[in-house]
Image: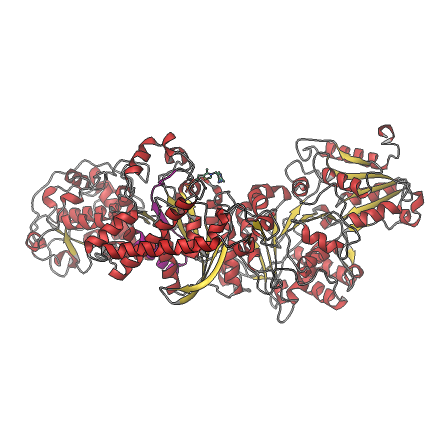
Amino acid sequence: MFHLRTCAAKLRPLTASQTVKTFSQNRPAAARTFGQIRCYTAPVAAEPFLSGTSSNYVEEMYYAWLENPKSVHKSWDIFFRNTNAGAPPGTAYQSPLPLSPGSLSAVARAGPLVEAQPNVDKLVEDHLAVQSLIRAYQIRGHHVAQLDPLGILDADLDSSVPADIISSTDKLGFYGLDESDLDKVFHLPTTTFIGGQESALPLREIIRRLEMAYCQHIGVEFMFINDLEQCQWIRQKFETPGVMQFTNEEKRTLLARLVRSTRFEEFLQRKWSSEKRFGLEGCEVLIPALKTIIDKSSENGVDYVIMGMPHRGRLNVLANVIRKELEQIFCQFDSKLEAADEGSGDVKYHLGMYHRRINRVTDRNITLSLVANPSHLEAADPVVMGKTKAEQFYCGDTEGKKVMSILLHGDAAFAGQGIVYETFHLSDLPSYTTHGTVHVVVNNQIGFTTDPRMARSSPYPTDVARVVNAPIFHVNSDDPEAVMYVCKVAAEWRSTFHKDVVVDLVCYRRNGHNEMDEPMFTQPLMYKQIRKQKPVLQKYAELLVSQGVVNQPEYEEEISKYDKICEEAFARSKDEKILHIKHWLDSPWPGFFTLDGQPRSMTCPSTGLTEDILTHIGNVASSVPVEDFTIHGGLSRILKTRGELVKNRTVDWALAEYMAFGSLLKEGIHIRLSGQDVERGTFSHRHHVLHDQNVDKRTCIPMNHLWPNQNVDKRTCIPMNHLWPNQAPYTVCNSSLSEYGVLGFELGFAMASPNALVLWEAQFGDFHNTAQCIIDQFICPGQAKWVRQNGIVLLLPHGMEGMGPEHSSARPERFLQMCNDDPDVLPDLKEANFDINQLYDCNWVVVNCSTPGNFFHVLRRQILLPFRKPLIIFTPKSLLRHPEARSNFDEMLPGTHFQRVIPEDGPAAQNPGNVKRLLFCTGKVYYDLTRERKARDMVEQVAITRIEQLSPFPFDLLLQEVQKYPSAELAWCQEEHKNQGYYDYVKPRLRTTISRAKPVWYAGRDPAAAPATGNKKTHLTELQRLLDTAFDLDAFKNFS
Ligand SMILES: Cc1ncc(C[n+]2csc(CCOP(=O)(O)OP(=O)(O)O)c2C)c(N)n1
């Protein structure tokens, strides 16, 4: 039962004879409040007709006039012009009398109506009232639309009717109108399309049409959009009379799709009644909805749709939208099947899929990909966006005309998860936009057991979309035709404006959260109603049978046809002996692996470069490669210093990165570096985007087609894109201030192609934890769960430099704790290509380079490896400018490689038998240690070995190091606190390396709760203490 919240029922359409009447009666002014009116230069109260009670009309009029001066009565047009021009109080209004056909054309067109009107002020006021009324429905009509299929809930969590929506005739008084005005004819403003061919309608009909457009099964939320053209477009789509028409053919297709959707769930329920499947019952309309969006988009030129969705209805979407073979889905229910692929796999409702097929409606090829997702609701949103952006980028689809994304959401998750907001904020950024996503919310009005009133503070779960001006179409899911219509409009919106749009499918959940759950524990009333609710398929079939669109036998045949398809697939699924997770890959990389999915080799070539290439890149990196371009004086000095480094055949950190990127671009590898302030670099060391200091904002010329936004900023130049004639493009982009969203996005971008180096840099390493979900759920276990490799690189500035607890630690301990290698098992060190095999087996690579040269090599190795693994790099801060942190070109020439371990090469190594202590360390502390060793004159007694690749652990090289210094004590030295950093990871592995023959001592800070002290002096004291321990050869005597 629906609430009768509007008076549509009482407002019958008028007959032609009723439409022309005079409205000479005086009616009492309704009580209204006097609101503030914007922008008036004349005090409004001074005008005779501006009583305190008319301010709402005037305000509405004023807004309408601002949008389009012709949309209001001529007299108002003159009034607003005069007031805005500064007319003194009392003079702005000019009476339109005497009336002549030419002077007031709009009114004059009303013919007998107007001529019979003696009181023009009242005529004006009534027209204003009607305009306000129209606008009220456009703004607030959705609040009274009948959206809940159960008829017991309010989709906006509010059962009240807005004061300006006509729910009964007495509410006409709000506008100063009454029942007697219902049959009077009013001219329609240009901001409405309810008239169709008519330019004037009786009030009764105006209200009826507004109710038809805005208060039935579709609630349109769009009036917050600040673009007139877009608002007009939406008004036209929903107000034009008779706009929602479907052919019988379309109705039959819709019924057939509902049959598939409904019977699929019923089939699963029959066969596996005790399995969780997160069925779609209560929102079966989702399948035809998605298919409509895809059909319409395909018709408009889209040939690749990338989708992300949560658990609810996922199997149904795989079966009936993506068209995954049913037997592949059914065999996922057989727990006894052995997995053919490595890794732990994932449960069936998280796996992804990729499928290319013909769209039967448009007869065009379409590729559909559903991105695998973790349980963490909405986490896949930015990943889908990133993958979509990459697919657009690689096929040159700069406007999103060929590749698009569809994101599905649950109502509780859409409202509750901050990543939704973070993803929306990427939607219009030049380097992140995918030119419009269609969002579909399965709004079953419950989240697990939680009522929406306890789950959100906003009226709708979709309100977050308003921040990006996305229109929101709420629709009652028990009206399949209304659903199809909004989906069609949503797809058209995207292809017209290339902006996000939301379809809110207001539905219910027939079962509990999953099929094992008892919903009556917590929602007894709702579920009593749900038990009574006829399934939508049955309702729609009855409707079409009653309309004669199908007959009962045809309908039944459609059902048995699909049931047979399911049964046959079920029989075939019994033949499946092995489960292939690979069949569930969402992003295949054709040609990168062999046909059976193996790497093409298990070696890695030298990552070195010729002197010529190094010099060329160095020269470009230290110059401005375009004419007539003035850079900042400070930057000139930086580039000059770079030039000198190149002349001296050395690189610092920034130059090493330049060399790695520049050389990969030459080899056709696209590079994308994204993160907060990456263009310049947080530490002002990178400067990959140069800014012309002389160009005025308005006269600039964009230098790079990748940067359309630069035409509102200063003129820029990216020297990295001026390196080679046919180089791959370099994308470097400052991101929004979101780690979760942007890291997810880049991960998705990296999914699309193995031939790209995609890097995300945290501003400081500790900020990665606001993206923890992407790290924990995707990057660390992605391959194990979804057989999907990913070569994303995380650059995490890290180092204890006295900057306090917040900017010091990238939390290496967390990354290391998640490495999948066994600390207690020594691998077979004699195995051929041991180092590459180790990389192949690991879940990710964790490095902390102590030299720019090694940083250069590890970046290049990331691409030259025959497979892809995520790479976590703890990057330095003070080392960026440390005079000793330099590498010679010789360390980067052909034949050189990334050094997993940098052994001691000083005096201690010349006479290893004399060495008393072998210190192991990683990263920046090496420079503190060598300085201290020198100061203490202990270069003969203490050897220092750097572990550059922490994981996979270089057992082989470290064993050689230990064996080289037979009399040395072993100690691990780190600047991080003992319960942090690398100690817990390194110690057991070092012990395993040496078969636990010796202790591994610790020289470092004590355990602590915070990563670093906030006191600079304490910081230095702590540092000195750890150095003292490292070089005190008696330090561990008492522990032996
Ligand atoms: C980030 C996150 N927090 C909590 C959960 C546990 N959880 C699973 S489903 C669910 C309710 C989701 O409700 P809604 O988004 O409305 O989707 P529905 O299940 O109703 O389709 C919750 C809280 C989760 N999966 N992810």
In this view of the protein, which residue sits in the foreground, 273 or 709? 273
Q: Residue, x 76% and y 60% (percent of image)? A: 892
Q: Residue, x 15% and y 55% (percent of image)? A: 200
* Residue 494 x, y percent position in the rendering: 39, 58
In the image as oriented, which residue stretches furthest toward the bottom? 725
911 on left or right of 328: right
Q: Residue, x 79% and y 45% (percent of image)? A: 927
Image-quadrant location for residue 358? bottom left
Q: Residue, x 17% and y 42% (percent of image)? A: 7
Q: Is residue 1027 visible?
A: yes
- The vertical placement of 169 against 957, above or below, is above
Ligand 1's quadrant: top left
- The vertical placement of 168 against 753, above or below, is above
In this view of the protein, which residue sits in the foreground, 37 or 361? 361
In this view of the protein, which residue sits in the foreground, 115 or 319? 319
* Residue 658 x, y percent position in the rendering: 68, 59
Whether residue 458 is in magenta: the answer is no
Q: Is residue 87 visible?
A: no
**Numbered marks: total:** 0
* Residue 640 x, y percent position in the rendering: 72, 60
Which residues are the magenta region?
483-511
Quarter of the figure with the C terminus: top right
Quarter of the figure with the N terminus: top left
* Residue 853 x, y percent position in the rendering: 75, 56
